[in-house]
Amino acid sequence: MDQWEKRGTSFSAVAASASVTPSRRQVRFVAQVKQDWMRFVPFMVYLAVPFSAFTLPIIIRFAPGMLPTGFRGHRIQELMDHSTLTMQATLGPDLAKVMVEKLDKCSNEIAQDSAMQFQHSILRRMVNDRETQAQYSEILATLPLIRVHLNLGKFDYIDSIKMASFSRITLPFLFPKARLIRRMSIIRQDDALLVRERFVGLSHEEIVEACRMRQLPIPSKEEGHISDEEMLELLKEHARFTERLAVADVPAFVLARVLKSYYVYE
């Protein structure tokens, strides 16, 4: 007598029930095999498709869909949330203080605009309130309004921050962090010298060129009210601020480039 008949159950019924509701072990085994098999697909695609400005949008569009199902969506959002919380704890208070200091130097523009006064008061309250010091997202929410009122330019840094957050998670082997920073930054590779404060022996032309690259105030021939020593101190201040943000990831570097516009010298 068959073992299924001994138990009072036919083999077809057991097979049908197993096909409808597979065991947890079977589900785990299938998912593991699928994940191991699909783990090599992105690398095969990246090796087959030549990397260029034309193929990168295609890779960004279709490569996340080739990743294992367990990684897609929730995992990326979890990594981005963790990165945001890390930046909230490390950069929130310093960023708010620096913004308030730079906005204090724009007192003339703020006094003529009631909306700007409101944003300035919000930043001051965030700096003084311990409970909201590290609320990085609220600080970011005030940046577009400040950019509009002070006419900081056409650089859409909020979208750049989102792009950097997405790129450094999904394309770490195609777009390394250093390459992405160099691509998004308007400052060239002499940052390494200025961050370490090797300012010895700079001529007047070199100081003016360094200020021009960082969009810091440069005196005209008619004005001439900023000496080389004062411009050098301004460069050192900017370098120290950049070095403090360098411990964070790419979005911090983007913000450093945005906040360079607040270095208004009076």
Image (cartoon, grey):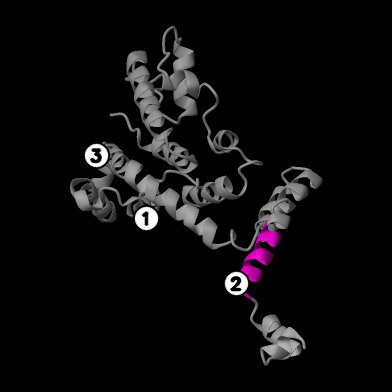
Quarter of the rendering containing residue 66: bottom right
Q: Residues within 10 Å of mark 1 (few under 14, many from 20)?
A: few
Q: Nearer the viewer, residue 229 or 100?
A: 100
30 in magenta: yes
Q: Nearer the viewer, residue 166 or 104?
A: 166
Report the label total.
Answer: 3
Q: Amino acid at mark 1?
A: Ala
Q: Position of residue 79 (x, y in %)?
A: 49, 53
Q: Is residue 197 positioned above or below 89 on the image? A: above
The residue at which mark 3 appears reads as 104
The residue at which mark 1 appears reads as 141
Q: Amino acid at mark 3?
A: Asp
Q: Is residue 230 positioned above or below 84 on the image? A: above
| Front of the two marks 3 and 1 | 1
Distance from the alpha carbon under mark 1 to that under mark 2: 45 Å
The residue at which mark 2 appears reads as 24
Q: Position of residue 180 (x, y in %)?
A: 58, 38
Q: What secondary structure predominates along the stretch shown in magenta?
A: helix
- Look at 63% across and 40% down and name the residue there: 175
Which comes sooner in the sequence, label 2 or label 3?
Answer: 2
| Front of the two marks 2 and 3 | 2
Q: Position of residue 156 (x, y in %)?
A: 50, 49
- Look at 68% across and 66% down and name the residue there: 30
The answer to whether marks 2 and 3 mark residues whose Cβ atoms lie closer than 8 Å is no
